[in-house]
Image (cartoon, helix red, strand yellow):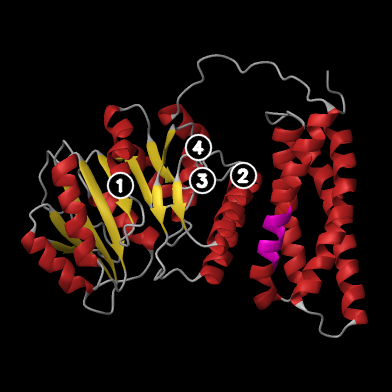
């Protein structure tokens, strides 16, 4: 059965079995080759291993090839398969439309390449069916996950999640794994607040859920990279950075009704948090060094991504600013054992002072390098930045330690 997303009206309700417990959405764009094998394999797995009635929804994102025809053939062949056609691209847009129209109490989605082993599907949705959790995500970054992918994608993934921890205080481990599920009643409250229609949709949904006090269940997955992935890394990374900035502003200004969501959906803590225990200097140095290594990797990744479209100095400013905020938040919690919002503003101001010093060091180093050499090699440019960052790191530790220990009991 096929139905079409309406551009200025609510999505039409699709005929479906009211007893379906799970609706798995497969968003696709120009996937006429992979769609058939994917849906048949998914259907066979659910029929064999899933103990409840299910639906599979193919959400076609305005494909220009024969994807829609393949989807309609699958829907005619398999009674549990339906098709949603949208006139505009966007994975987030497709998920919003399909999830909003589904009557199933548990909603999920997975990528058409089936990079994630389907054996994790039942563990993903079981806590939602039982009511134990509100959302569930597959994570490629757990110690027990088994992942096959290139170094470049590994660094990008870990750098992005580190950036989320620092800028948006994310506590989930893997924002972009294409393997997630949500309870329908939770989706009905969160989806109207999610603005992104592309790849940042997942991150925005998870951050809102976390801030609303919802329980996010994580499932370690086995995952094999698809070499034919359609994701364009640089535009996607820049769009994600814009999304982080937009969402961060909304959280700071109070533009989102988080208090209302927490009251209606959130889970209250069972007992007050334990008293903070100050961390000794040796452990602080070790933890600060670990955060510094991760921050440097994230900084270099962001610099490389932004160097082409922005130029050296603007790319340095953007990468240093984002990682400075992330570094302060991570050191506040992990290095110095400070939790809660008390004095957070002062700590971040101290971090921004360290940022200004780091900017002066790195920008000055870049300026001197470009004065000495008209077109320095990219490797030399990165080496100079690493040396300047090491000097800035020593200053950062001193300033942050003074800030974190100020007026502490």
Q: Which mark is residue 50?
A: none
Res 356 visible: no
- Find residue 157 and report its horizontal and vertical position in percent: 55, 55
N-term mark: 4 or 3: 3
> Residue at the spot x=27%, y=61% of the render?
9
Q: From the viewer's perspective, is 88 left or right of 252?
A: left
N-term mark: 3 or 2: 3
> Residue at the spot x=17%, y=62% of the render?
3
Give the labeled residue for mark 1: 108
**Element under disc 1:** strand
N-term mark: 4 or 2: 2
> In the orientation shown, which residue stands out farthest toward the top?
271
- Find residue 244 and report its horizontal and vertical position in percent: 59, 54
Q: Alpha-carbon neighbours of circle 1 within 10 Å: few (<14), some, or many (≥20)?
A: many
Q: CA distance from mark 3 to mark 1?
A: 20 Å
Residue range highlighted in magenta: 296-303
Give the labeled residue for mark 4: 210
Q: Which mark is residue 141?
A: 3
- In the rendered view of the protein, which quadrant contains the C terminus? top right
**Element under disc 2:** helix
């Amino acid at each position: 059965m096929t139905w079409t997303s309406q551009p200025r009206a609510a999505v039409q309700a699709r005929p479906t079995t009211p007893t379906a417990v799970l609706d798995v959405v497969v968003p696709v764009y120009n996937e006429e080759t992979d769609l058939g094998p994917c849906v048949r394999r998914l259907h066979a797995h659910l029929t064999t291993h899933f103990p409840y009635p299910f639906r599979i929804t193919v959400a076609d994102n305005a494909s220009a090839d024969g994807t829609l025809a393949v989807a309609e053939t699958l829907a005619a062949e398999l009674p549990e398969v339906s098709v949603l056609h949208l006139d505009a691209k966007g994975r987030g847009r497709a998920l919003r439309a399909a999830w909003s129209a589904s009557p199933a109490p548990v909603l999920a989605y997975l990528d058409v390449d089936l990079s994630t082993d389907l054996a994790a599907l039942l563990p993903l949705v079981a806590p939602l069916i039982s009511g134990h959790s509100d959302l569930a995500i597959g994570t490629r970054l757990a110690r027990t996950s088994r992942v096959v992918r290139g170094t470049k994608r590994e660094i990008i993934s870990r750098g992005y999640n580190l950036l989320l921890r620092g800028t948006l205080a994310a506590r989930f481990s893997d924002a972009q794994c294409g393997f997630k599920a949500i309870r329908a009643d939770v989706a009905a409250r969160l989806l109207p607040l999610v603005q992104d229609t592309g790849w940042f949709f997942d991150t925005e949904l998870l951050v809102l859920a976390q801030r609303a006090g919802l329980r996010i269940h994580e499932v370690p997955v086995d995952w094999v990279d698809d070499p034919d992935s359609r994701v364009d890394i640089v535009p996607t990374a820049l769009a994600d950075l814009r999304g982080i900035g937009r969402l961060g502003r909304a959280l700071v200004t109070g533009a989102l009704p988080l208090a209302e969501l927490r009251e209606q959906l959130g889970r209250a803590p069972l007992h007050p948090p334990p008293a903070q225990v100050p961390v000794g200097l040796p452990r602080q140095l070790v933890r600060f060094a670990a955060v510094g290594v991760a921050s440097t990797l994230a900084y270099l990744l962001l610099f490389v991504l932004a160097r082409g479209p922005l130029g050296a100095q603007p790319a340095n400013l953007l990468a240093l600013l984002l990682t400075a905020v992330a570094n302060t938040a991570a050191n506040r919690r992990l290095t110095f054992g400070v939790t809660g919002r008390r004095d957070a503003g002062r700590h971040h101001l101290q971090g921004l002072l360290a940022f200004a010093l780091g900017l002066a060091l790195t920008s000055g180093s870049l300026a001197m390098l470009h004065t000495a050499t008209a077109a320095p090699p990219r490797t030399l440019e990165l080496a100079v930045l690493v040396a300047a960052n090491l000097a800035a790191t020593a200053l950062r530790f001193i300033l942050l330690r003074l800030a974190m220990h100020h007026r502490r009991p």
